[in-house]
Image: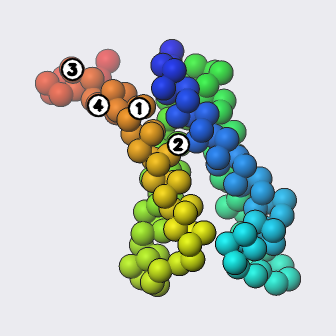
């Protein structure tokens, strides 16, 4: 699949962001979370629970970036980018309702995640629509 410049930009921004955040948490969780005012301590179980999804986020970031250079991965990369950058803000908004307001750093992360989600929705909007034959009730080829 050939990507537009906007689609490439959306995947690039999404991929670099996810890879960087996941990689930072994986490599240095204390430093990353301290930037939000969160002290982690030395509990190996907690650190493992933070590093595991961080590795997944980094892998998803790499997949988003791979979709830019490998046409066969483009569709999957778009789905991953949308999933990650819609799920993160959804989880944060749920947390605000359930737990109250987090720190300013977390709210800043929410704003960035919402901006990336909006970019992805705009960039991929024409690919999110069902093909004409499906809208008319014909089965996929």
Name of the residue lying farthest toward the left: 136
Q: Are marks 1 and 2 in contact (CB under 8 Å)?
A: yes
Q: Look at the numbered disc 4 and give the secondary structure of its residue.
A: loop
The answer, for residue 11, to whether it is visible in the render is yes
* Distance from Cα at disc 3 to Cα at disc 2: 26 Å
The image shows residue 56 at horizontal and vertical percentages of 68, 53
Q: Look at the numbered disc 2 and give the secondary structure of its residue.
A: helix
Q: Which mark is residue 140?
A: none
Name of the residue lying farthest toward the front: 104
Q: Name the residue under label 2.
A: 81
Q: Which residue is drawn at 72% across and 69% down?
A: 35
Q: Residue at x 53, y 42 (%)?
A: 80
Mark 4: give few (<14), some (14-19) or many (20+) Cα within 10 Å. Answer: few
Q: Which mark is residue 124?
A: 1
Mark 1: give few (<14), some (14-19) or many (20+) Cα within 10 Å. Answer: many
Q: Residue 129 carries which label?
A: 4
């Amino acid at each position: 699949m050939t990507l537009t410049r906007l689609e490439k930009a959306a995947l690039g921004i999404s991929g670099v962001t996810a890879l960087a955040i996941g990689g930072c948490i994986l490599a240095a969780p204390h430093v990353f979370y301290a930037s939000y005012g969160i002290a982690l301590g030395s509990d190996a179980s907690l650190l493992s629970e933070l590093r595991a999804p961080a590795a997944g986020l980094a892998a998803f970031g790499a997949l988003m970036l791979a979709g830019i250079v490998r046409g066969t991965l483009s569709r999957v990369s778009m789905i991953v980018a949308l999933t990650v950058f819609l799920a993160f803000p959804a989880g944060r908004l749920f947390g605000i309702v359930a737990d109250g307001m987090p720190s300013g750093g977390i709210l800043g992360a929410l704003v960035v995640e919402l901006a990336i989600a909006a970019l992805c929705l705009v960039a991929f909007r024409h690919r999110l629509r069902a093909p004409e034959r499906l809208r008319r009730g014909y089965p996929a080829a």
